[in-house]
Image: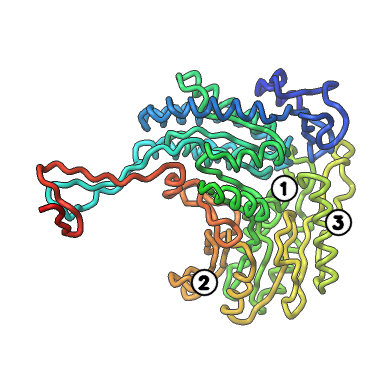
Amino acid sequence: MSLAVLERLGLHKHPRILTGSAIKPGTPTPTPGQVVVTNPATGKAVAAVRLDDAASYEKVITESQEAFKRWREVPAPVRGQVVRAIGDAFREHKEALGELVTLEVGKIRQEGLGEVQETIDIADYAVGLSRTLSGPMLQSERARHRLYEQWLPLGLVGVISAFNFPNAVWAWNSMLAAVCGDVTIWKPSLLAPLTAIASNDLAEKVAASLGHPGIFRLVIGTDQEIGERLVADKRIPLISATGSSRMGKRVGEIVAGRLGRTLLELGGNNAVILHKDADLDLAARSILFAAVGTAGQRCTTTRRLIAHESVVDEITRRLVEAYRKVQIGDPLKEGTLVGPLVSPGAVETFLSALAKAKEQGGKVLVGGERAANLSPEISGGNYVMPAIVRAPANNALPIALQETFAPILYVFSYRTFDEAIALHNGVDQGLASSVFTENLHVSEAFLATSGAGSDCGLAYVNLGTSGAEIGGAFGGEKETGGGRESGSDSWKAYMRRQTVAINYGKELALAQGIRFGE
C-alpha cells in the first residue's frame, strides 16, 4: 500500500525519497544524511528521506530571499488566486494525501482526510482574506493631514511543525503567509517528512505554474543541523513553531535573542468540567472523541475530566463502558476509531505515566496496556489500550499535571464550581477548555469576562476540547506559548504594521501643538 500511495502522489521517483532496497537498515538515521520513515501501524519501514545540510539550507534561504522580493510586488488579491488554485489541487489529491498522513503518523483514515480538508478550508479562508488585509483610517489632530495604518509583507516565515498534524499546521501558516506576501520555509517533523514533501511540492508546483516559483520551500533535517540554524537566522523575521513546551522555550529564547518574532503553539493539558446538570449522553460522546481521537496525540486532547461529585460515578461508568467498545487497529480499515501511537517511544511514555499514576494512588479503571490480539499484518505496530485513571479522593495526582501525549484520561471530582475552576486552571498549560452544563450562571462563570473562569485560549460550552474551526484564532496561554494561528486576525503575525502620516497642506504642523522656529 505504501508504494502505491507514493506513486499516486508522484513521489516514488522523487530525488529526496528512497524506497525498497535503497533503504538501509537502522533507526533513526541509517546513514549520514538520511532518516527512515516507519509506518506506526505495522512497524515496517516505508521509505528513507534525504536530509538537508548547512549548504543546502543556505541555498534555500538565499533563493527564498529573491523569491520574496518578487512575491511581495504581486497584488494581494492576485496572491489569493494562487492560493485558490493550491486549494483546488489539494481537493484533487485529498484521498491520497489523507492516506499518506495515515501511513506516516497512524491517524485513522477519516482523521487523515479531515486534516487535508482543513488545509483546503484554510486556503479558502485565505482567498477571502487576500481582499481584506486592511488597516484603520485614523483621525489626525493636525489640519490637512491624513493618518492611517497599513500592513506590509513581513519576509521569510520559518514554520516548524510537529508530527501529529503533518499537513494542516503548515497550511495554517503557509496559506496565510502567502496571501500576506511572504515566503514560507518549512521544517517538518522527522516522523512525517513524506507528507511534508508531498504537500510542499504540490503547493510549489501550482504557484510555479502560475508564474510565482519559490514561495513554498522545505528544509528537512535534524534539530542540531537545521532546526538550530533556522531559529537563529536573522534573515527570518518570524518563526512559527508547534511542539512541546520544552521545545518552544528553546525556540523563544533563541529568536528573542536576535529580536525576532515567534508564534508558539505548544503543549496542552486540557480539561472538561462536568457540572451536575450536564447532559451526560452528549458529554460522554464528546469526551470519548476528545480523549481517544488521534490516539490521544492532539494538543487539544482531553486529558482531565473534572466531574461534580453527584455525577462522577455515572459518567465514569459510561466512559469505561465506551472505552471497552472502542475499535483499535488498522487505521485504514473502516470502523477503526483508534490507531497506533506514533513510535515505540510513545508507547513507553504511555506505560511509564500509568505506572506513576498507580504509585501516586490513581486507579486504572480500563485499558493501560499494550493492545493484544491484533491481526498479523499490524502486530508490529505501536498500539495501546486507551486508559481511564480515577484520581484519589483528595485529587492529588501529580502525574496529571504533566502532558502525556497518549490516550490517558484522568478523572477528578469536585463539590463547588470554584473548586472545579481551581483544578482546571492548576496546570502549566492553557490551550483548550470545556464545560458541560445547562446552567447559564455556570457557563457564564466559566467564560467570565473578568478572566476568573477558564484561563485557556479556547473555551467551549457543551463541546469537547478537540475540533477547532479554522475561522477562530487557535492558540493558548501560559506554557502553550501565547501564539494564535488560523482565523480571526491571526494574519497580522505574518505582516508588519506601518503608521502613515501625510501632510497635504502647505504648512508645517507639529503634533501636541509644538511650535518650532517661529
Q: Residue placed at 67% from the left, 45% from the top?
A: 164
Q: Nearer the viewer, mark 2 or mark 3?
A: 2
The 10 Å Cα crowd at callout 1, few under 14, some 14 to 19, many 20 or more, is many
User: Which label is found at residue 369?
Assistant: 3
Q: Is residue 334 visible in this depiction of the protein?
A: no
The label number, if any, that marks residue 453 in the structure image: 2
Compared with residue 116, is residue 242 higher up or lower down, i.e. above or below?
Answer: below
In the rendered image, residue 241, in percent from the top left (x then y), is placed at 59, 46
Q: Nearer the viewer, residue 10 or 250?
A: 250
Quadrant showing the N terminus: top right
Please give the residue where the numbered disc 1 appears in the rendered image. 337
Q: Number of labelled discs? A: 3
> Whole-percent x and y of residue 377?
86, 36
Crowding at dot 2, Cα within 10 Å, few <14 / some 14-19 / many 20+, comes out as many
Q: Earlier in the sequence, mark 2 or mark 1?
A: 1
Secondary element at image label 1? loop
Asked whether the viewer can see residue 486, the reply is yes
Residue 319: image location, x then y, percent? 72, 63
The amino acid type of the residue labelled 3 equals Glu
Element marked by disc 2: loop
Residue 212 spot, x, y in % from top left: 46, 22
